């Protein structure tokens, strides 16, 4: 069963556009480095696109997170007026998988 889990994880990631994969990886990096339970969409946006105004990319970030949420890789929630996201246990397991890390690196090299 472990092989099929790896294969399904790989298929999910290979189906994701590069920008969404980049956001997934960035979310993991931010959660780890900040030891945070969840990361605001704003923080994610300024980390990935420091040169852009949040309002100009808010819908893009929201779309990316929605797609990752649909694949079961991230959870999303609102706290007050802010939207937050975090890796799900499946998302965390996926990004920790060595085969998957290799795939992500290969995709980044081909950017």
Image (cartoon, helix red, strand yellow):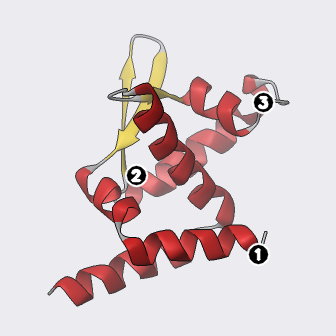
Between disc 1 and disc 3, whose residue precedes?
A: 3
Distance from the alpha carbon under mark 1 to that under mark 3: 22 Å
Residue 71 shows in the view: no
Residue that appears at 52% across and 75% down:
102
Lateral position of residue 97 relative to residue 57, left or right: left
Q: Nearer the viewer, residue 35 or 82?
A: 35
* Residue 11 position in % (x across, y down): 44, 82
Which residue sits furthest top? 80
Query: Circle 1 sits in a helix, a strand or a loop, which is it?
Result: loop
Residue that appears at 24% across and 89% down:
3
Which residue sits furthest left? 1
The residue carrying pointer 1 sits among few (fewer than 14), some (14 to 19) or many (20 or more) residues within 10 Å by Cα, namely few
The disc placed on residue 69 is: 2
**Front tag of 2 and 1:** 1
Mark 1 = which residue?
A: 110
Residue that appears at 54% across and 78% down:
14
The residue carrying pointer 3 sits among few (fewer than 14), some (14 to 19) or many (20 or more) residues within 10 Å by Cα, namely few
Mark 3 = which residue?
A: 50
* Residue 109 position in % (x across, y down): 73, 71
Residue 53: which quarter of the image?
top right
Quarter of the image that includes the C terminus: bottom right
Between disc 3 and disc 2, whose residue precedes?
A: 3
Distance from the alpha carbon under mark 3 to that under mark 2: 23 Å
Query: Circle 3 sits in a helix, a strand or a loop, which is it?
Result: loop
């Amino acid at each position: 069963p472990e092989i099929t889990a790896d294969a399904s994880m790989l298929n999910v990631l290979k189906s994701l556009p590069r920008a969404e994969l980049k956001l997934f990886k960035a979310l993991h990096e931010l959660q780890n480095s900040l030891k945070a339970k969840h990361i605001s969409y704003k923080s994610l946006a300024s980390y990935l696109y420091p040169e852009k105004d949040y309002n100009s990319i808010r819908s893009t970030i929201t779309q990316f997170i929605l797609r990752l949420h649909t694949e079961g890789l991230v959870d999303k929630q609102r706290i007050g007026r802010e939207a937050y996201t975090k890796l799900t246990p499946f998302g965390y397991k996926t990004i920790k998988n060595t085969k998957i890390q290799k795939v992500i690196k290969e995709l980044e090299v081909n950017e």
